[in-house]
Amino acid sequence: MRILANKLPVYQSLAWKSSARIEFIRALLGRNLSVTVLESVKEMLKEMEILKVKGGIILEVHVKPQSKSFKIKVDNILIVFCTQSPVKGKANRELIMELSKIFGKEVEIVSGFQSKRKRILVKDIMEEEVREILVVAQE
């Protein structure tokens, strides 16, 4: 079973400067983050394991279904709070759709379809770009 989401055009150009991408993502997510918060999140992201593969990046994700709102928390792994229940793949579909919106790339579950711990493939993206996006996407 493969769950794919359509590639959503959040931003296309890798030629954007890092600060411009971060500002764009902040505006997209409607977050006003302080520099101190951003620096502490960057430190946590350095410890998080991101696997580079031929097609993109694989992230270890721990999903917490039936949360009040969809949000992301970065620890040693990526913790994703989903609003949907884990029945008939609803939480998996929400996870794929929301991560596709955040990364602006095609996202696919590689393993853990019926588990809370999943491996997620984000296609055609670089490690630095993933780290920048996760800094901004986290609360």
Image (tube, rainbow, N blue to C red):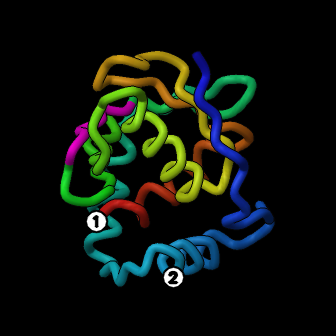
Q: Is residue 98 magenta?
A: no
* Figure label count: 2
Disc number placed over residue 27 in the picture, else none: 2
Residue type pointed to by label 2:
Ala
Residue 133, how many percent across, how many down? 51, 59
CA separation in Å, label 1 and label 2? 14 Å
Examine the image and state in which quarter residue 40 appears: bottom left
Q: Is residue 126 left or right of 89 when viewed as pictured?
A: right
Along the line of sight, the residue nearer the viewer: 127 or 90: 90
Q: Looking at the image, which residue is at 54% across and 72% down?
A: 25
Point out which mark residue 63 bears. Answer: none
Q: Which residues are magenta?
A: 61-66
Image coordinates of residue 46 in percent, x first then y, are 39, 44
Helix, strand or loop for the magenta stretch, by majority: strand
Location of the C terminus by quadrant is bottom left
For residue 76, say whether it is visible.
no
Mark 2: few/some/many CA within 10 Å (<14, 14-19, 20+): few
Q: Is residue 123 visible?
A: yes
Image quadrant in which the N terminus is located:
top right
Determine whether, in the image, residue 34 is placed left or right of residue 123. Answer: left
Q: Quadrant of residue 89?
A: top left
Q: Position of residue 107 (x, y in %)?
A: 61, 39
Q: Which residue, given by chain and number where applicable, does mark 1 sit on? A: 139
